[in-house]
Image (cartoon, rainbow, N blue to C red):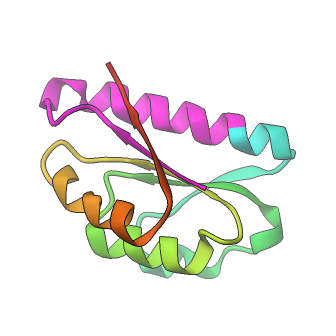
């Protein structure tokens, strides 16, 4: 499952969106008794999959979000904090993958 957290594009909400996404990833991983892994670049993909409870992407590029989705969406949960500046681009993830979008108030 991919969870896409969004704050509606307001810059002042970005810290809250990031925090809520982080908490969701921690909750998922805790329930699986595994760890949260945060990918910042494609080079971070060398993590052992059996240790991953959830993958966290904080304001990723569209390329990183799509690549992580392609490689891991069938294997583990992915939590994405959408960027206020480039979040609209992540709509592509909603088209390519089954995504649960969560709006952070």
Quarter holding the C terminus is top left
Residue 12 placed where, x, y %?
17, 24
Residue at (80% x, 63% y) in the render? 51
Q: Nearer the viewer, residue 98 or 27?
A: 98
Residue sitting at the far top: 105
Q: Which residue ends up furthest to the right in the rendered image?
A: 33
Q: Is residue 77 left or right of residue 99?
A: right
Relative side of 77 to 85, left or right: right
Type of secondary structure dominating the magenta stretch: helix
Query: Residue visible at 66% across and 38% down?
Result: 26
Eyeballing the image, is 37 above or below 23? below
21 in magenta: yes
**Picture coordinates of residue 23, whole percent (x, y):** 57, 31
Using the rendered view, name the quadrant where residue 17 is placed.
top left
- Expressed as whole percent of the image width and height from the top left, the position of residue 93 reads 36, 65
Q: Identify the magenta region.
A: 1-27
Give me the residue at 31% from left, 29% from top. 15
């Amino acid at each position: 499952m991919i969870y896409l957290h969004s704050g509606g594009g307001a810059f002042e909400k970005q810290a809250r969106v990031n925090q809520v996404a982080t908490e969701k990833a921690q909750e998922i991983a805790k329930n699986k008794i595994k760890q949260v892994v945060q990918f910042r670049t494609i080079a971070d993909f060398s993590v052992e999959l059996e240790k991953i409870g959830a993958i966290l992407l904080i304001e990723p590029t569209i390329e990183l979000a799509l690549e992580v989705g392609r490689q891991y969406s069938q294997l583990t949960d992915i939590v994405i904090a959408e960027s206020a500046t480039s979040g609209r681009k992540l709509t592509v993830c909603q088209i390519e993958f089954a995504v649960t979008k969560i709006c952070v108030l």
